Image: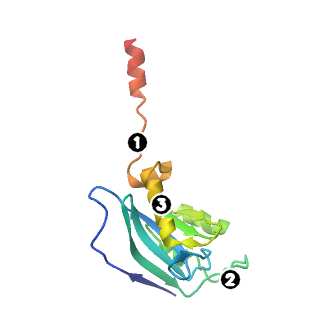
Amino acid sequence: MSRTLRLVEPAGPAPGEKPLRVAIASNDLERLDAHFGSARQIAVYEVWKTGARFVEVHQFSNSTDQKGRHDDLEDRIGPKLEALSGCTLVFALAVGGPSAARMVRAGMHPIKRKEPEPISAVIEQVQVMLNGNPPPFLRKVLGTHVKPDFTADFDEEETA
């Protein structure tokens, strides 16, 4: 069973700036401190270059036991992936290989951290990345991916 709680805030990104949906596995909703499969809560934020806002928290009653065994009778990862639909980045202390593969197929990019850290620090790191040089997959998601123009090189060769 899962439950979703949402907070509606009017403040958002500047017009034309697309926010990035980020999910963070957390037990206390203050720190990134849970493995993806065993997380009882996953907080979702919208993050943009100059700000961020809490969107919702998903609470799950079924979590994996972190023993490395997979129960074929009950899919505990599927409901989490379904709840996180639309998220681009998913931060957790650990993500199993099969879960990571399912995330990638669903359009999410799992990011593993070695140690717990405050959610505010994770949000700040995402903002630094957005203000710097985001990886190509994020530029594509954000709509800022610029395709190279090879015709300019070709035109110079023709006129020379």
Q: Secondary structure at mark 2?
A: loop
Of mark 2 and mark 1, the one earlier in the sequence is 2
The type of residue carrying mark 3 is Val
Please, which residue is most extreme toward the top here? 160
Q: How many marks?
A: 3
Q: Nearer the viewer, mark 1 or mark 3?
A: 3
Q: Secondary structure at mark 3?
A: helix
Give the residue pinned by disc 2: 65
Give the residue pinned by disc 3: 126
> Is residue 15 left or right of 149 when viewed as pictured?
left
Image quadrant in which you'd find residue 92: bottom right
> Is residue 126 left or right of 111 when viewed as pictured?
left
User: What distance separates the C-alpha of mark 2 from that of mark 1?
Assistant: 44 Å
The type of residue carrying mark 2 is Asp
User: Which residue is found at the position 37% from the left and 64% from the top?
Assistant: 51
User: Which residue is found at the position 62% from the left and 75% from the top?
Assistant: 35
User: Which residue is found at the position 55% from the left and 88% from the top?
Assistant: 61
Residue 146 is tagged as 1
Q: Locate residue 77, reporting x and y percent.
A: 58, 76
The type of residue carrying mark 1 is Val
Q: Which is more toward the observer, 15 or 58? A: 15
Q: Locate residue 159, reporting x and y percent.
A: 37, 13
Quadrant of the frame with the C terminus: top left
In the rendered image of this protein, does residue 119 appear above or below residue 14? Answer: below
Q: Is residue 41 visible?
A: yes
Of mark 3 and mark 2, the one earlier in the sequence is 2
Residue 114 is tagged as none
Q: Is residue 88 visible?
A: no
User: What distance separates the C-alpha of mark 1 from that of mark 3?
Assistant: 21 Å
